[in-house]
Amino acid sequence: MSLNMKKYKVKPDTKTDLSKWDPNETGDFKDGKEAGLAEIERLTARLGELQELLYAEGKHKILVVIQAMDTGGKDGVIRRVFSGINPQGVRVAGFKVPTPEELAHDYLWRVHKVVPGKGELVIFNRSHYEDVLVVRVHEIVPSEVWGQRYEQINDFERLLVENGTTILKFYLHIDLDEQKERLQARLDDPTKHWKFRLGDLEERKRWPAYMQAYEAVFKKTSTARAPWYIVPANRKWYRDLVISSILVETLEGLKMEYPPAEENLAGVVVE
């Protein structure tokens, strides 16, 4: 990948130690934010072109999964990385606490309903992985139940891929100090109070358990067909640059083409 983004991809069946992944990294952009923002501007324009082509061709399906700890930047990625695309052909699906109807079905039921169709790009703000993250950390179901879900998720994603879906999964990697600053910023800004929950502080205490849960997710579910990327996310501009770069290169690799024009257009004049 351009700009050496391959290093953020988790190899299949590889043990991951998140403490060894630097959330402050800025990769090839040693000169700092200004150069990075210029590259993001270029990538944003290119992503807009590619999404229009995706929609026009109507052949491929793109699923982008975004996971993170609280304040990790999921909403920010959606606002910034996808700011240059036409809303037509793009959807965002969020997954909160399951409803009674959703709980009456298997845990993947609510997910399968919102996967992309042909020509669509769908972004998951949280995802089916909550059922091996929150469910595991809070012991909502026994380990023998959630322990089976890794393979079930792999089977589900294989089904999607074999039916024409390209899957990219991003974990936005921040550290405890950065989370502390971001939570405090929400408390200091009255316009951000709605985003703060006292429960966030309780979740923060479970940080080590969540890191173990994420490491298990990466080892068991980063596959060649549906890879995970661990994105350094303490610096928001670099987070956005990494994701934009991977998206653009992936879409370019699909070799998409505009559909052929209608026949007999030669000589047509609009009066």
Image: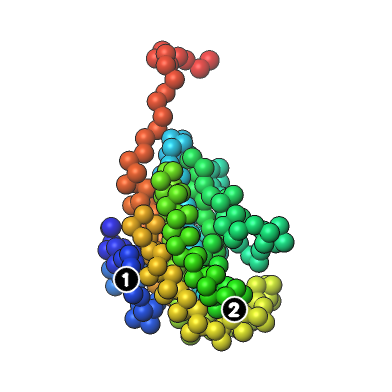
Q: Position of residue 204 (x, y in %)?
A: 56, 83
Q: Amino acid at mark 2?
A: His
Q: Are marks 2 and 1 in contact (CB under 8 Å)?
A: no
Residue 30 or residue 163, whichever sits in front? 163
Q: Which mark is residue 138?
A: 2
Q: Amino acid at mark 1?
A: Thr
* Real-space Cα separation, disc 2 to disc 1, in angstroms: 25 Å
Label 2 SS: loop
Q: Residue at x 52, y 73 (%)?
A: 144
Q: Residue at x 46, y 36 (%)?
A: 58
Q: Is residue 191 left or right of residue 237?
A: right
Q: Can residue 232 be spotted in the picture?
A: yes
The answer to which of marks 2 and 1 sits earlier in the sequence is: 1
Residue 200 or residue 219, whichever sits in front? 219
Q: Which mark is residue 14?
A: 1
Q: Which mark is residue 172?
A: none
Q: Which class describes the residues within 10 Å of circle 2: few (<14), some (14-19), or many (20+)?
A: few
Q: Position of residue 105 (x, y in %)?
A: 64, 57
Quadrant occupied by the N terminus: bottom left
